[in-house]
Image (cartoon, grey):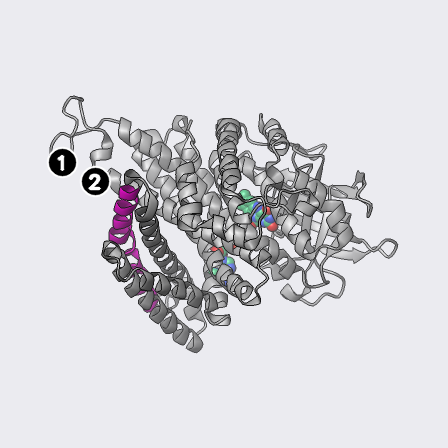
Amino acid sequence: MSRYQAPLRDIRFALFDVIDAEALYARLGFAGAQRDVMDAVLDEAARFTENVLAPINAIGDEIGCAFDKDSGAVTSPPGFVHAYEQFVEGGWNGLVAPEQFGGQGLPESFGVALKEMIDAANLAWGNYPLLSHGATEALKHHGEAWQQEAFLRPIVSGRWTGTMCLTEAHCGTDLGLLKTRATPNAADGSFAISGTKIFITAGEHDLTENIVHLVLARLPDAPAGTKGISLFIVPKFKVGRDGAMGERNAVRCGSIEHKMGIHGSSTCVMHFDGAQGWLIGQPNKGLMAMFTMMNTARLAVGIQGLGLADRAYQNALAYARDRLQMRSLSGAKFPDKPADPIIVHPDVRRMLLTCKSLIEGGRLLSYHAATLVDVLDHTSDAEEKKRADELLGFLTPIVKACLTEWGVECTYHALQCFGGHGYIAEHGMEQLARDARITTLYEGTTGIQALDLLGRKIMQLQGAGLQHFLGMIQAFCAEQSGNAALAEFVGPLALIAQEWQALTMEVGKRAMANADEVGAASVDYLFYSGYVALAYWWARAVAAADASSPTDLKTAKRETARFYFARILPRTLAHAASIRSGAAPLLTLDAALFDS
Ligand SMILES: Cc1cc2nc3c(=O)[nH]c(=O)nc-3n(C[C@H](O)[C@H](O)[C@H](O)COP(=O)(O)OP(=O)(O)OC[C@H]3O[C@@H](n4cnc5c(N)ncnc54)[C@H](O)[C@@H]3O)c2cc1C
């Protein structure tokens, strides 16, 4: 079984030393977010995730969920219900939820630290409360007052969980194709929802007394495509306007999927047979309302990649220090032992340092992106709000796609460090690699995140978010220009920031002439952007460590940053070359000749 110890030191370093979240929270008026309170919460979160969630991670994988086809009931793996009860009793569910609905109102970006620990400890379990957070966001922003009163309190308290019902058999990425129908019930203003959704995470389970589905469906006479989609709230047990829970609604789980990983997370086919639902927000504007949910969910899935990568790295590191194989090429490092520990070998260090640099850099990238959610929700300055919105929109696909792809990469590196033992179930490394694989797929595949970044955030919105990020890099480089100790990072960072801008212009020009250029460049552009963004955060990490950290941390940050700049940042060269090769190499081979 793999072990997990919450990386509290690096979480605190990221939040408080680099991002300076404490000052931001004070400025935004978060009354409860003082350092001593947050430190105590982080300690407790570590205890809960290490002692309650981590020990049932392997059991969840081995036993998985069970489905009873007669009743449509889903039973979660042993220990999941009890862990959820403790989660709710501890008040974790409402940590960042609004106080007016019973939450604790702590900052979203602070909640991301808890989220990372949950995902690392037990990703499959973490999927049950995950979508409650998304449902809270959608209701908070788009729900009517009675809907907020009736649904938000039980969701925030943890008595009910939420789901997100978008996907149908014939439509995943292309939601414009969806067929689920919503017919008005004249009597009470509700709607009858009919259709079948597939792949619904936590669509049915035994953790809570009710489940609240957020469902995309079409009203009669709705325009075709994405402009004709509305959002509905459809509870498993009906809920009246007074919030009272009533009879069973006409929604039922038809089966659960058997899948590569996250066996403890139920993935359900959901049948809606004229189920009572309530419209959220405006008719035909459902996709916009759902995007409120999807953006936070996309950041959250990025954090899943981070958490799994970190757990895998922790185990690989311990193994590499312990496992004795062969001597170092430059002579024995531990002559008293029968062989050297494998951590002396450059190739094992390559794998470990790749993980360490992507994880710690990714933590800064994602935590900072989450602070923009706090700014967006809490600032009263219109200009600051606009900037946060544009920057968050730009960073969300980068966080989602890069952190999940790096999660896959790191769990594979970590498994490789174990040699053949990594492939054997006993060590738990193969579970982490299998679990990580879903993160690049759900909440929009990597390819779709890349299209969102280049097609929408760069081309349609004229790169406003990129300009803000480049502004952050320029300001940092200017501020550090006299700091000789940082010159080895600041110089290359300033240069690559210029190339990023030039490359963006090149792609933009080409795309004006041929729209396929966007699709051809998008994934390379996304990774190029992710690696440059991480270079910025690594340079900032060294600056912050130099300013106040103990010697071991200072040295570790500097040496890891050197590794990142020397060994990982050059991946941008290959991405830039691919981008510059244009669409032709991808499009000239006729589809009929792919098997010739
Ligand atoms: C375990 C699990 C849990 C899930 N949970 C939920 C959930 O809770 N709620 C929910 O609604 N859905 C859920 N999903 C569905 C998930 O979000 C979709 O599977 C995903 O969005 C991709 O859709 P698809 O599978 O239909 O693939 P498709 O849309 O058919 O895509 C197939 C491939 O084509 C690529 N592609 C498609 N269009 C384009 C394009 N225009 N340009 C470039 N590439 C393109 C995709 O990137 C992908 O590689 C879940 C799925 C799984 C497996």
Residue under the image location 31 percent in, 29 percent down: 319
Residue in the foreground of this view, choosing between 156 and 292: 156
Residue lying at the far left of the rendered structure: 331
Q: What stretch is highlighted in magenta?
A: 554-582
Tell me residue 459's x, y (percent).
Answer: 47, 71
Say which quarter of the image contains residue 6: top left
168 to 479, vertically: above or below: above
Query: Which residue is under mark 2?
Result: 346
**Identity of the residue drawn at 50% across and 59% down:** 392
Q: Tell me which amino acid carries mark 2.
A: Pro
- Mark 2 neighbour density, 10 Å: few (under 14) some (14–19) many (20 or more): few
Q: Position of residue 482 (x, y in %)?
A: 26, 61
Please tell me whether residue 336 belongs to the stretch shown in magenta: no
* Image position of 49 (left or right of 333): right
Quadrant in which the C terminus appears: bottom left
Q: Nearer the viewer, residue 109 or 70?
A: 109
Is 453 or 11 nearer to us in this picture?
Answer: 11
Left or right, 310 with respect to 66, comes to left
Direction bottom: furthest residue: 513
Label 1: element kind:
loop
Residue 100 visible (yes or no): yes
User: Answer yes or no: do the residues labelled 1 and 2 have beta carbons within 8 Å?
Assistant: yes
x, y (%) of residue 82?
61, 27
From the viewer's perspective, is residue 479 above or below residue 53? below
Label 1, on which residue?
Answer: 329
Q: Which residue is drawn at 71% across and 51% down?
A: 195
